[in-house]
Image: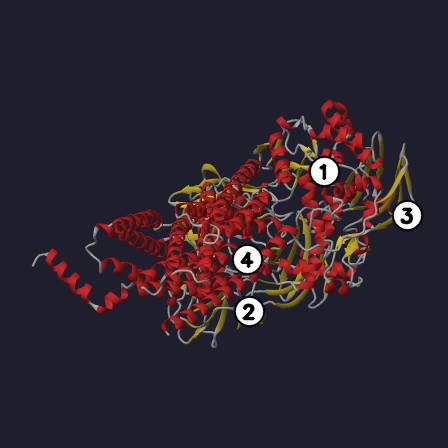
Amino acid sequence: MRRIFLALIAASMTGAVRAAEPVVSLPASAKTMDLSAADGIAILSGGRVKPLLVAATEGIQEIRGRAGLTRELGPMRSWFALALYPDSLSNQRVVFCAFRPLRTAIGLDPDGQFASFTELADNAKLHKLADIAAAKQRDKERLDPVEKAASDVARRLEKFAEATSASDWRLMIGPKGKEGAWRLPQEIPPTEVASDPALMRRMDAFTRMAMSYQSGDQPGFDSAASELARNELLTDSLSSLGDGTFQRVRESNVRAELALVEYRPFRIAWIVLMFGFLLAWISETTRTGAPQVSRRTTWLAGICAGAGMVLLIVGFAMRIYVAGRPPVTDMYETTLWVGFGALLFGLPIAWIYRSRTVLAAVCAAGWLVFVLADNLPTVLDPTIHPLVPVLRNNYWLTVHVLTVTISYAAFLVAMAIGNVGIFQEFRSGSDEFRRTLAHYAYRAMQLGVVLLTAGIVLGGVWADYSWGRFWGWDPKETWALIADLGYLMVLHGRITGWIRPFGTLMGAVLAFFGVVMAWYGVNFILASGLHSYGFSQGGATAMGTFVVLQGMFALLCWWRRRINLSRAAV
Amino acid sequence: MNLKTWAQRNLEVLQANPIIRFMASVKLAVVTMASLGVVLAAGTIVESRYNGDMARLCVYDQWWFHLVLVFLFFNVLLAVVVRWPLRRSQYPFGCIHLGILLVLIGSVLTQFGGIDGSMEIPEGGATRAMHLPENVVRTYLNDQLVAESPVRRTLDPRAGDLGAVPGMPDPAPRILEYLPFSRTFQRVVPDTQGGPIVELALLAVGTDPTTLRLGLDNPLVSPREDLGGLMALSLERAPDVSSFLDTSSRSPAKFDLTARAGTDSLRMNLADLRVPGRKFRSGNLSAEVQEFLPDAEIGPTGLSNHSDSLLNPAVRLRMQHLDSSWDEILYGRVPDFRFSGDRHPEVAWKVDFRPVGGASQAPLLRLGVVGDTLLARCEKAGHVLSAFRVSLGRDVPLPFGILHLSVGAFESHGEIRDSCAPVDPQPGRDLPPPAIRVGAGPWGSSRWVPLGGVFVWNELGLRRALSFEGRRVSLPFGIRLDRFKVGDDPGTTQAATYTSFVHVVDSLGHPLDSARIAMNEPLKRGGFTFYQASFANDPGKVSTTVLSVNRDPGRFLKYLGALLAVLSIVWYVLERSRLGRRGKSE
């Protein structure tokens, strides 16, 4: 067991497995220049005003699947190189295209990982496959893996072409208050620049920044970039929402977003929680052998958990401030929210019942959730997107999603306690301890049921408000109901006497599969119904592995329980 | 014996009844919840594989699903009845169960008394009609609607005598078969009672042929079709062949070009453009004719000439302005879009085109019938572009750029006959439409009527018709769409808002008041609520909004029940922990 935990820690420390890197040939200065002065330049990208660093990271993420053409270049150097050395980079093998069957199908060297933009863009076989994939997607047909890969590569090429033509650099601000004020430098007629001194200054700084980047003039670049990053026009500028309404853009928003990506409070939180878990685990194992050590480590674990909580609150506050809405509209945000809720419910339970086991379980649950959120950007996309129409101006949505997802947090706590509880079958713990754990799990499930039921009802209110019906057997609402029924069965099963402490713990573990399905499965596996704004792909392997491992662990504990019972009977 | 004692005694009998006790048991509750969970999971899997309609047909509309809900209802109800009168500590339990009952009763009210339909309104149009997701058979006598009866949608085909067509006087036809999923094949057959029928295919480069069947003298079949803004089509009786084919032009053809760059301006007319190599110059701007095509067509191999008639002239010019030079292709007209002069930002173009017959806006293909002869005339804005006699099976190019016409069948007295065959629904696709077979009429054998189909016959001096279609109801007032607008997120083409600007109109179409319907901003009027549900705004077409219209008499009970249930669960948990603490302290 300990080895598994160590492996998990090692995996979360190193992040994803290191893949091969492409060889990028650029002038030496383009590889080494420090471009951080340009990080905070505000630009309009993806329907939102954001720092250049964020736009670059998102853009490169789409092309490369990670934040940089190579690890050494990182997002900013990659983004600048694409815009300012487009011809050179178009002919270098930097576009990620590693799927072997696809490479074979389109006549590339099957062992390679990368291809150049030009060779892919000129590849008729790839175009044909991508066209077939697009037609199938239009007709809602399933894609085979090669078509899926071809469609991904085609999307990367599109983004690559966008990056090399610098058509995402909307950093010029037009006349104040004018609709569509954020423009590309090449869009603005010279006569307009000549007539507006502020615009002229900004345009001049932009040109200087580009030229000093190309000539490797670091001080020149820093001064031009800092001038652009002052965003002096920003305070009063407006970003049009297109329907005649305007969203005020504040410079502090851009700064807060830059801080969010630079300091990564959610990443620090999982590291702190990991230590919290390890310390709680040590305090639990040394409870009888070295009570002094145990007491100290308990305190330290508690401090770690508290610090994690504070970091999460800070992170959430910043994200809410940047996005201008509660963080409840995509899988990434709900994942963070559930992890936060698990700590919110779990830590008081651990405190009230003075339980190191619960503390360890809660820290572990939070750690796992935040590691997932931090390391699977293609599945749990941290990008702050503008809201789809149905989610706008919606008070009920916010209340509904917050309630439902916080109930998942209570169930996550119940599941974590349940796992600790059923694992006691392999230890010589007392029945009393098992009963106590079952009681905690029962309480967490009760809390979860209250919240989930309220959340489902609020969802009905929202559905009635947005679509005109309270209940429509939509897969998302139906699975939330199934999950609720699963827990209600466990709670009612206790009354009938069918379920005892072990059954309660096992129920808390197994009923969580309903939550997994309602939360992840409907959006990523079933992908049908009205909640289509949340649909996505990926992560099926990770989630499938979790379900299989969790199922096997439960089965193993149940089998052990049978053996223990028969031994006791003898 | 007074009422109270009577109720008391019956309650005691009820409470002692073992069946009732079983129905009220927690064990049955657990089993019911498990069954419900399994059934619902199956429903969502069906929905994921097919769609929501299929899930309703397979699960949510099935009798056994309703049976599970009925079990749940009685289980919840009797759980309270057997414990009646409740002790104080059981109040939260009673309230939770009462809440669930209210929600279930509210749902039944919605199911039977509510309306949930949709309204499609094009920009500038108004409607009172609301479409409901149910199917009906409608009966018409002498073009008057006399009866409408619902046809229940089921998963399995039904055969045998499914009842007489309502409202039809003797000899009334009977419905003999129902196919839930069908594919319809149509053919044109001779019928002495029928009017002219034509079956034609329209072919455009790069798309599948569109097959159309048009009939005359059938008030329920529209003789005119609008092909998605590309072209309108009509079938009519022509007075005589010669007048229908008369294409004498009132004004000569014209294809004039003007190019302007700064103070320089070039004018070129048709006679000049027909001469390859001809050069024009004005100041810094010059042009040289490379190629002239009187009837240009964009085909799979690029630009080619289609005929020598001046229908869609195009010219390829070599342009020069200051130190830049480029090739420019200027078209007279390609249906509904103009492609001229965008290669050089400094040069502004004006293209003036009038085909033989006059300037044109909306293309129209008019088919005329004289005796046994079928004629065709291509028009735009009332001006004739070309006219010809139609021969069966021949591929005829139309002067609308890239369209070809081929007539497959023509009957001067005929009927369009449908035949339907069962098909299996395909995952991920829309469900195939249902069809009914109607028999024992005067036509001898039976007839298929697919959804949206209609057929008409004369018998015993009555003109009879029956149709199988979606149910429509008329609201007491109408909605007129003034404008539909999609707002994008700044700098993207991603939709941020959908808004319909509408007027509520009375039954005569007079505007009452204006309103705005947007996502999450429904309009409430006359007991109905209108939600922005969907839209169609393809380029070159009139935008259409789709509103979902809803009336729910069960809403109050559902809200009340849900609120009661949630608050009572909280009460229950608090009460339990209070009792638990007291139990421990004792």
Neighbour tally class for label 4: few under 14, some 14-19, many 20 plus, Cα within 10 Å: many
For numbered disc 4, what is the local secondary structure? loop
Q: Amino acid at mark 4?
A: Ala
Chain for disc number 4: A
First in sequence, mark 1 or 4: give its number. 1
Q: What is the number of the mark on residue B183?
A: 2
Q: What is the number of the mark on residue A527?
A: 4
Residue B357 at x, y percent in the picture: 73, 48
Dot in front, 4 or 2: 4
Q: Are marks 4 and 2 in contact (CB under 8 Å)?
A: no
* Marks 3 and 4, how far apart at CA: 60 Å
Same subunit: marks 4 and 2: no
Chain for disc number 3: B
* Residue placed most toward the observer, A281 or B449: A281
Q: Amino acid at mark 1?
A: Trp
Neighbour tally class for label 1: few under 14, some 14-19, many 20 plus, Cα within 10 Å: many
Please tell me in which quadrant of the rendered image residue A136 appears. bottom right
Residue B402 at x, y percent in the picture: 73, 56
* Marks 3 and 2, how far apart at CA: 55 Å
Q: Which residue is mark 3?
A: B276
Neighbour tally class for label 2: few under 14, some 14-19, many 20 plus, Cα within 10 Å: some
Same subunit: marks 1 and 3: no
Q: Residue at x 63, y 67 (%)?
A: B372
Same subunit: marks 3 and 2: yes
* Marks 4 and 2, how far apart at CA: 28 Å
Q: What is the number of the mark on residue A169?
A: 1
For numbered disc 3, what is the local secondary structure? loop
Dot in front, 1 or 3: 1
Dot in front, 1 or 2: 1
For numbered disc 2, what is the local secondary structure? strand
